[in-house]
Amino acid sequence: MDKIIIVEGTSDKRKVKDIVREPVGIICTNGTIGIAKLDDLIEDLFEKDVYILVDADTSGEKIRKLFRKELPEAEHIFINKMYREVAAAPDQHIASVLLQANIDIHPKFLDMRMN
């Protein structure tokens, strides 16, 4: 898989997995990530398209900051702050932000966006 999406938790992973149509790897940080784990992870992410999709809260911002420093080429995908959590955001919102990042989504979510 050439595309990897980094999320915080397993509920985020399930939501994204249900929406994404193309084969992508989805990696959970489990809320936090240490430098040692990040270093190991970065080796596995070499030459892949990496997307960061984390919650719009303090924990998510800490994760984003780490990735900006250690993996500056990663693309950051943002949810609307009113939802706060990826898992709490409506499916069509997640589908929309993924589509904007050129990640293929299931057609049923395209139909939902049009309504």
Image (cartoon, rainbow, N blue to C red):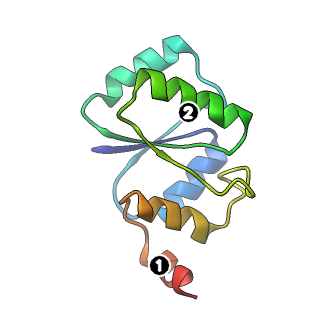
Of the two numbered discs 2 and 1 in the rendering, the one whose residue sits closer to the viewer = 2
| First along the sequence among labels 2 and 1 | 2
Amino acid type, callout 1: Leu
Looking at the image, residue 95 lies above or below residue 6: below
| Left or right of 50 on screen, residue 93 | right
Q: Position of residue 85 (x, y in %)?
A: 71, 50
Q: Are marks 2 and 1 in contact (CB under 8 Å)?
A: no
The local secondary structure at tag 1 comes to helix
* Separation of residues labelled 2 and 1 (CA atoms): 28 Å
Q: Position of residue 28 (x, y in %)?
A: 55, 36
Q: Position of residue 8 (x, y in %)?
A: 61, 38
The local secondary structure at tag 2 comes to helix
For mark 2, what is the residue? 64
Q: Give the class, few, some or many, for how many residues have Cα within 10 Å of label 2's Cα (few <14, many ≥20).
A: many
Looking at the image, residue 11 lies above or below residue 43: below
Amino acid type, callout 2: Arg
How many numbered circles are shown? 2
For mark 1, what is the residue? 110
Q: Give the class, few, some or many, for how many residues have Cα within 10 Å of label 1's Cα (few <14, many ≥20).
A: some
Please state, as top left, top right, bottom left or bottom right, where the C terminus lies in the image.
Answer: bottom right
**Residue at the farthest left position:** 47
Please state, as top left, top right, bottom left or bottom right, where the N terminus lies in the image.
Answer: top left
Q: Position of residue 76 (x, y in %)?
A: 48, 44
**Residue at the farthest bottom position:** 115
Q: What residue appears at the point 60 percent right and 43 percent down from the top-left corner?
A: 54
User: What label sits on residue 49 in the rendered view?
Assistant: none
Q: What residue appears at the point 62 percent right and 49 percent down from the top-left corner?
A: 12
